[in-house]
């Protein structure tokens, strides 16, 4: 949402009515910081309960190998289809290339996540990494709570970035070709819009949470013994793989909440559902905005 607010306010052709609506949403989100902060303090959501230890001292190396396998699978699938479709680097950054990649990327994401799950299942590590029965998590309820708590803070990050961009005279709308491709689609439901929505709301949350929360965050925690260090470093990595830079502060804040929700509930389903809800609401908001 932070990037959508930013896009709406920096587009030179945006109507005053849209700017007023977006400004109202900004104010509501910022007002939401108060109840969010109160809820975080009263429920002591910033505390992390004891985390089950992993089976052996060699586990960080095993998790790192699985992360590498997932990433290499993702790259291999993208490279294979790019070669089949004769897409070089220049073509990949063009609107036509982005249209094709919208259809390929979710396949690559799910392929990488699938390899990780298969390897973890063979090593009998799925319960230790993805679900801790002693935590008694309620995935949907906790995911909805995480989403409600994180929205105001992501909006705050977006407002700060928007002010910086205005001050420096930048225009972030030209840095992410996906928005140009989406706005170039015909009105109504199209194949690209459906696939993009499923990619953002289904494939990306599953793949990214498996890699960044289930694997990377647990690997760092097992190395350092400090959950908050693991959350912080995994969130930095998560933010760095998202472009353009204008969305990275908001993505970093989102990742902090997702990582904390994972460690507090003991279920990877919580950050997956919260991530999916966040992405879905962003796309819905973007679809409802006038061009």
Image: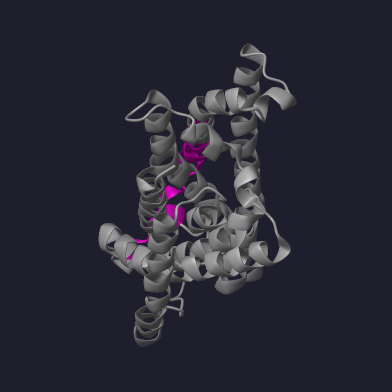
Q: Nearer the viewer, residue 280 or 269?
A: 280
Q: Quadrant of the C terminus?
A: top left
Note whether residue 183 is visible: yes
Quadrant for residue 80, please give it: top right
Residue 108's place in the image compared with 55, above or below, is: above
Q: How is the image coloured?
A: one colour
- Residue at x-position 55% and y-position 71%: 227
Q: Nearer the viewer, residue 75 or 39?
A: 39
- Residue at x-position 49% and y-position 48%: 210
Residue 82 magenta-drawn?
A: no
How many numbered discs, if any? 0
Quadrant for residue 198, please give it: top left
Residue 118's place in the image compared with 19, above or below, is: above
Left or right position of 123 against 187: right
**Spot occupied by residue 265 in the image (x, y as percentages of width and height):** 37, 66
- Residue at x-position 45% and y-position 67%: 263
- The residue stretch that appears in magenta: 110-134
**Spot occupied by residue 106 in the image (x, y as percentages of width and height):** 48, 32
Note whether residue 56 is visible: no
Residue 133 magenta-drawn?
A: yes
Q: Nearer the viewer, residue 232 or 277?
A: 277
């Amino acid at each position: 949402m932070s990037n959508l607010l930013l896009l709406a306010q920096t587009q030179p052709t945006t109507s005053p009515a849209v700017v007023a609506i977006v400004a109202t949403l900004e104010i509501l989100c910022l007002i939401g910081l108060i109840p969010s902060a109160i809820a975080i303090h009263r429920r002591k959501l910033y505390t992390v309960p004891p985390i089950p230890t992993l089976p052996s001292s060699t586990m960080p190396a095993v998790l790192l190998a699985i992360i590498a396998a997932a990433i290499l699978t993702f790259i291999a699938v993208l490279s294979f289809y790019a070669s089949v479709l004769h897409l070089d680097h220049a073509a990949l950054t063009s609107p036509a290339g982005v249209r094709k990649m919208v259809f390929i990327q979710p396949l690559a994401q799910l392929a990488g996540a699938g390899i990780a799950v298969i390897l973890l299942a063979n090593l009998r590590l799925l319960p230790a990494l993805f679900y801790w029965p002693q935590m008694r998590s309620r995935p949907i309820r906790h995911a909805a709570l995480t989403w409600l708590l994180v929205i105001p803070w992501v909006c705050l990050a977006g407002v700060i970035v928007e002010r910086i961009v205005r001050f420096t005279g930048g225009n972030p709308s030209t840095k992410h070709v996906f928005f140009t491709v989406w706005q170039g689609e015909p009105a109504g439901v199209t194949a690209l819009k459906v696939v993009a929505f499923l990619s953002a709301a289904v494939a990306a949350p599953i793949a990214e949470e498996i890699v960044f929360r289930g694997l990377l965050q647990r690997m760092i925690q097992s190395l350092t013994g400090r959950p908050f260090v693991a959350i912080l470093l995994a969130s930095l990595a998560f933010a760095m793989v998202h472009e353009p830079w204008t969305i990275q502060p908001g993505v970093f804040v989102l990742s902090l909440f997702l990582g904390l929700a994972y460690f507090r509930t003991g279920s990877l389903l919580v950050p997956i559902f919260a991530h999916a809800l966040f992405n879905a609401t962003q796309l819905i908001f973007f679809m409802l905005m006038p061009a």
